[in-house]
Amino acid sequence: MREEGYAAMTSRRIAAKAGLKPQLVHYYFRTMDDLFLALLRRGAEENRERLARALAASDPLRAVWDMCSDTEGAALSAEFMALANHRKNIRAEIGRYAEQFRTMQVEVLSRVLEESGVDPKVWPLPAIVFLLESAARVLVIEQSLGMSTGHAEMIGLAKKYQELLGAARKPRKAKATAVSASSRRRRTAA
């Protein structure tokens, strides 16, 4: 699918690539849509694990940016999006997984922004997550088309934002840890 696109995928080509008889592909996947859904679900579950690792990283904003900037993932996503234009069941499944991923990102990154002192009323987190993810993906898509205007500036802006949040987060975390330790000592002494 990555190499030649979804339109080139047939049960015969898949069987030949896997060294199987075409009937075996149909035995496990009644239709090509069933095969596409299985591929989508498998990839989405792998991406859910990657996202969980990225969100658990010491710098989750940067880790999510790096994950969204993955060229292979973007190419495969583009193929599934093209397929989704013609297949409602694929579109619905992509939407379901995308909502789950966005919810995971918002939950974890809200903590990061809170630790950085960012006011969610001024900087609504779902919008920040949307912009972060979208910018990274658009950069990859445009790079694959040979475009570069504004890319260095966007990457610089994203890194600057990540660094500012990281710098704001460290003192606030240290202060919160000190306050928490002080509270425990007072309770122990009482």
Image: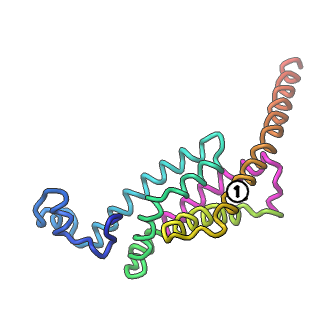
Magenta residues: mostly which secondary structure? helix
Q: Position of residue 105 (x, y in %)?
A: 61, 55
49 is within the stretch colored magenta: no
Closer to the camera, 153 or 176?
Answer: 153
| Rendering quarter of residue 88 | bottom left
Left or right: 171 with respect to 128? right
Q: Position of residue 43 (x, y in %)?
A: 40, 57
Chain part drawn in magenta: 95-121
| In the depicted structure, whether residue 69 falls above or below residue 186 | below
Task: Give me the residue at 41% from left, 64% from top.
Answer: 76
Q: Position of residue 47 (x, y in %)?
A: 46, 54
Q: Position of residue 28 (x, y in %)?
A: 19, 62
Tag 1: amino acid = Gly
Q: Which residue is mark 1?
A: 156
Task: Give me the residue at 57% from left, 68% from top.
Answer: 138
| Secondary structure of residue under mark 1 | helix
| Rendering quarter of residue 103 | bottom right
Task: Give me the residue at 83% from left, 37% from top.
Answer: 171
Left or right: 94 with respect to 26? right
Q: Pick the quarter of the image with the N terminus.
A: bottom left
Q: Pick the quarter of the image with the C terminus.
A: top right
Left or right: 89 with respect to 183? left
Task: Give me the residue at 30% from left, 73% from top.
Answer: 33
- Colour scheme of the picture: rainbow
